[in-house]
Structures are given as structure tokens and as C-alpha cells.
Amino acid sequence: MIRIIIIGYMGAGKTTVGKALGKELGVPFYDLDWYIESRMRKSVKQIFDERGEEGFRKIEHNMLHEVAEFENIIISCGGGTPCFFDNMDYMNQQGETIYLKATPEVLYGHLRMGKGVRPLLLNKTPEEMQAFIREQLAYREPFYEKAKHVLDVNLMDDYKKIKITTEKIKELLNL
């Protein structure tokens, strides 16, 4: 049975790597945020707007416990998922956890170019965004570092390097 849970800060490439790895291994891929949106029939932003971060985190916790019971699955979690409740310990019990680690500068570059709506970054100037990423990463890193595997993804900026990353994961997990 394969159960891989990918964590890291927003913009680290969790969804991109998860999709590619799922395709290579022939295993379904679930993005936890997408799963939440499909189950709740609302966007993450709508849930944040209606219930605040605390309300969202409770839903996220419950949905994590639901989806992490599936067998033969690859899951990418939201950047904050490991930092709330017992989520990180639970994920480590459920499967192989992989932290995609990148510097604040690389993350800022990815997020600046990204097309998705990130509720925690809305209405921030570039300088505020950079400061926010540095502060949050400093807070979240101790949770991320509890992952069973840590993979540096600072240079994962094209499809060839994404392929190298998926190969490294397969090597790490003996797949």
C-alpha cells in the first residue's frame, strides 16, 4: 500500500509534485484543499471569509482524517495543515510524509507568479508578502521538519527538475 503525504509552505510545489508522482506511480492524487472544496461545495477563500482561519482549520483537520484513511493515495496538504491540532503526528502515523523545503525567496518567486487565490496573502504588497512568508516559514518550519523525509526543492523550476524530484521521492521511499 502506498500512502504519501506531501507538506511544505504554499508555493513549494506540493500539488505539482503530487500530481506528477501520482501519474508516475499510477496512484490517485488528492490536493487536500481541492478535497475540502469539493466536499464543502465552497472555495477555501469562501470558507475563510465565512468561518475565519480557526473554522477553516477545524474543517481541514476533519477532512485530513477522512482522506488520509484512503489506501494507495498521494495527498498534498495546505501549507498550514501540519501546524494545527495533532495533524503532523497523525500524518506521520498514516504514511510517508515528505517536506518540500524551499527558501523564502524561492517561495516568494513562485507565489508571485502563481495564478491561485491565497487567502493569507490577499492585499499584501510585495514587501509585506516577503516579510509574511519569512515570518510564517520561521513559525511553521519546526512542524514541517517533523516529516519523515525532507527534500530540497529550491531549484525545481521546470518540468525536467520536477521529474528529478519525483525520482528522488521514489528513491527515498524505495518505490
Image (cartoon, helix red, strand yellow):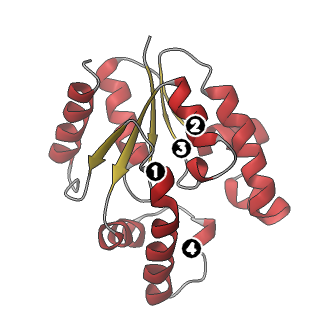
> Which percent across, then down, holds residue 47?
77, 56
Circles 2 and 3, Cβ within 8 Å, touching? The answer is: no
Q: What amino acid is found at the position of numbered circle 2 in the picture? A: Asp
Does residue 65 appear left or right of residue 83 in this picture? Answer: right
**Picture coordinates of residue 155, whole percent (x, y):** 19, 57
Upstream in the sequence, badge 2 or badge 1? 2
Query: For residue 66, which quarter of the picture?
Result: top right
Question: Could you tell me how far apart the alpha carbons at marks 2 and 4 are, in whole angstroms?
Answer: 27 Å
Tell me whether the residue at label 4 lies in contact with that at label 1, contact meaning CB atoms closer than 8 angstroms: no
What residue would you read off at disc 1?
144
**Residue with the mark numbered 3:** 77
Marks 4 and 1, Cα distance to the nearest angstrom?
20 Å
Residue at point 55%, 50% (across, down): 78
Provide the secondary structure element on which disc 3 rests: loop
Residue 59 - label: none
Q: Which residue is mark 2?
A: 89
Proximity of marks 1 and 3: CB atoms separated by less than 8 Å: no
Residues under labels 2 and 3: Cα distance? 14 Å
Q: Position of residue 10 (x, y in %)?
A: 47, 59
Foreground label between 4 and 1:
1
| Front residue (pair 72, 150) | 150
At label 1, the amino acid type is Tyr
* Residue visible at 52% across and 66% down in the picture: 139
Of pointers 3 and 4, the one earlier in the residue sequence: 3
Image-based side of 43 in relation to 31, left or right: right
Foreground mark, 3 or 4, reads 3
Residue assigned mark 4: 121
The kind of residue on which mark 4 rests is Leu
Q: Is residue 42 visible?
A: no
Q: Closer to the camera, 126 or 94?
A: 94
